[in-house]
Image (cartoon, helix red, strand yellow):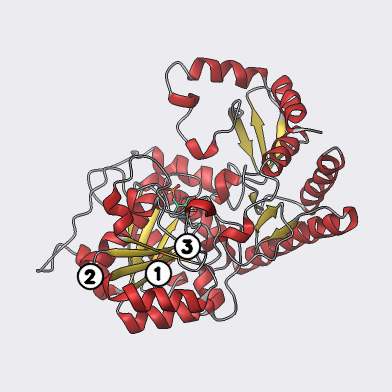
Amino acid sequence: MSLDKELAEYTAKTSHSRALHEEAVGVMPGGNSRTTTFFDPYPFYSQRGQGAHIWDADGTERIDFNNNYTSLVIGHAHPDVIKSVQAVAENGLSFPGPTEHEVRLAEMLTRRIPSLESVRFTNSGTEATMNAVRLARAFTGRSKLAKFEGAFHGTHDWVMVSVTPDPKTAGNRKRPKPVPWSSGIPPAVLKHTVVLPWNDREACAEILAREGDQVAGLIVDPFLCNAGLVPPADGFLQFLREETERRGIVLIFDEVISFRVAWGGAQERYGIRPDLTTLGKIIGGGLPVGAFGGRRDIMDFYDPRKGGPRISQGGTFNANPVTMAAGVATLNALTPEAYTRLDALGERLRGGIARLFTNTRRKGQVTGVGSLLWLHWTTETLTDYRSTRPKDAEAALRVFVGLINEGILLTQRGLGACSLAMSDDDVDRFVNALARVLARG
Ligand SMILES: Cc1ncc(COP(=O)(O)O)c(C=O)c1O
C-alpha cells in the first residue's frame, strides 16, 4: 500500500484528532508543541495510557512501542508511580527550595552509576546537556564542543548541529562539516563545534589531534540512540576515553536514552568511566526531568559554598518533589530481574523482525540493544550515521503510519522501546502487524 493509502486509512480512523488539530492550528504553530513528534497531516491526540496501551481521541487502542520516545520504561500509569505522585502532590506540588525527594533520587542515581559522584537535576535532557557543555567549558577554559554526526542531544543551540545533515552538504565522511539543524543557530555555534564520524577511530584521532587543544568537551550517546542505534565498534568508546583523557577533554556520556539498557546505563555495559553523564527520560518516571553529574571536582563548579569561578544554575521547577517521587518509584521497579525481562522482550522483538526480513527478503534490518530497537530501510552495513540513511526516503513514514493503522505505535524515524508492562504476546503482535504492513507495501 502506498503512503497515500496508509494516510487515507489513518485520517479515516482519527476524525476526533483531526478536529482537535484543526482547532489547535489556530493557536499553535503546527497545532502542537513538539516539532519532533509532528507528522503530516497531523499526529493523533492521546487521551489515555495504561500499561502497554495508549488510547487516542477517537478511543482507538494501540500498543505503545514509542513510550514517549523511550521515557516510559515500566509502562503508562504504573500503580506504584501513580500512588507516589498522588501522595506527594497532596502535600504541595513545588517549593522555593529543596525537598527530601531530591536527595533520595540523587542517592539512587549515584549508587547505580559509580562515575556520578555528584549530581544536579533539571527539567529536561536538553537542560542537562546544556549544563554539562557549559561545565566542560568552565572547567577546561576551552570553547569548542565535539559531537558525533547524527547524534541528538536536545534542543539548545550548542547541540543543534549535524543532527540529520544531508551528506551532500555535510562534507567528507571522514571530516564532517558542522551543519545547523535549524534556522536561528548563529554561525558562532558552528565555529565552536567539531563534528566527528561515528566508529571511525582513525578519522576521530586525526580531527582531535588537530583541534583537541581547543575542545572543552566531547559529548557522546554511547549507542547513537537517535541515529539508528548503531552500536559502538569494539573498543571505540574505550578509545574515546583514552583520547579525551590524554588531551584534557571532558568526556560527557549522554545517557538520556541509554540509561534504560542496564542498572548503571551504557557505561556499566562497556566498563567506561566518563567525566560527566547526562540523564533524563526514565529517571522522571514519565514527568519532565533531566540530570547531569559526574566527577566531584568538576561538579564543584556548581557548589555555591566554594570560591573561584562558579556556575549559576536556576530552574523554578528543578527537582520538584512530584517528579523526584515518580523517579524514585520507577527506579525501585527497575530491579536486576526487570532488566533481564526488558532484555528478553527486546531480543524477542528484534529476533522476530529479523526473521521477518529474512523470510520476506525485504530490504530492511533491525538494530538495538536491551529494550530498544530501530527499523532500518537499507541493506548497507551500518557503521555510522550516513550508512543509516534510508535508500527509500518514504519507507520509514509508510511503515510508521501502517503500524498505527495496525494498532502499533513506534516513532516516525523507526526508534522503538519495550516496557515492562508488555507481554510476549504484545511483542508478537508487533511482528505480525509489521508483516501485514510489509505485505501490502
Ligand atoms: C540522547 C538524548 N539527549 C538529550 C535529549 C533531550 O532530552 P529532552 O527531550 O528531555 O530535552 C534526548 C531526547 O530525546 C536524547 O535522546
Cα gap from disc 2 to disc 3, whole angstroms? 21 Å
Q: Which residue is the site of mark 2?
A: 139
Circle 1 crowding by C-alpha within 10 Å: few under 14, some 14–19, many from 20: some
Cα gap from disc 1 to disc 3, whole angstroms? 14 Å
Query: In this rendering, does residue 100 appear at all?
Result: no
Which residue is outermost to the right?
Answer: 359
**Residue 17 quadrant:** top right
The answer to which of marks 2 and 3 sits earlier in the sequence is 2
Determine if the C-beta at disc 1 is less than 8 A from ligand 1: no
Judge whether 352 appears above or below 268 on screen: above
316 relative position to 15: left or right: left
Q: Position of residue 49 (x, y in %)?
A: 62, 36
Question: Residue at the spot x=45%, y=74% of the render?
Answer: 204
Q: Position of residue 148 (x, y in %)?
A: 46, 63
Judge whether 321 appears above or below 386 on screen: above
Instruction: Give amino acid for label 1.
Output: Thr
Determine if the C-beta at disc 3 is less than 8 A from ligand 1: yes
Residue 255, label in figure = 3
The answer to which of marks 1 and 3 sits earlier in the sequence is 1
Query: In this rendering, does residue 441 appear at all?
Result: yes
Residue 372, label in figure = none
Instruction: Give amino acid for label 3.
Output: Glu
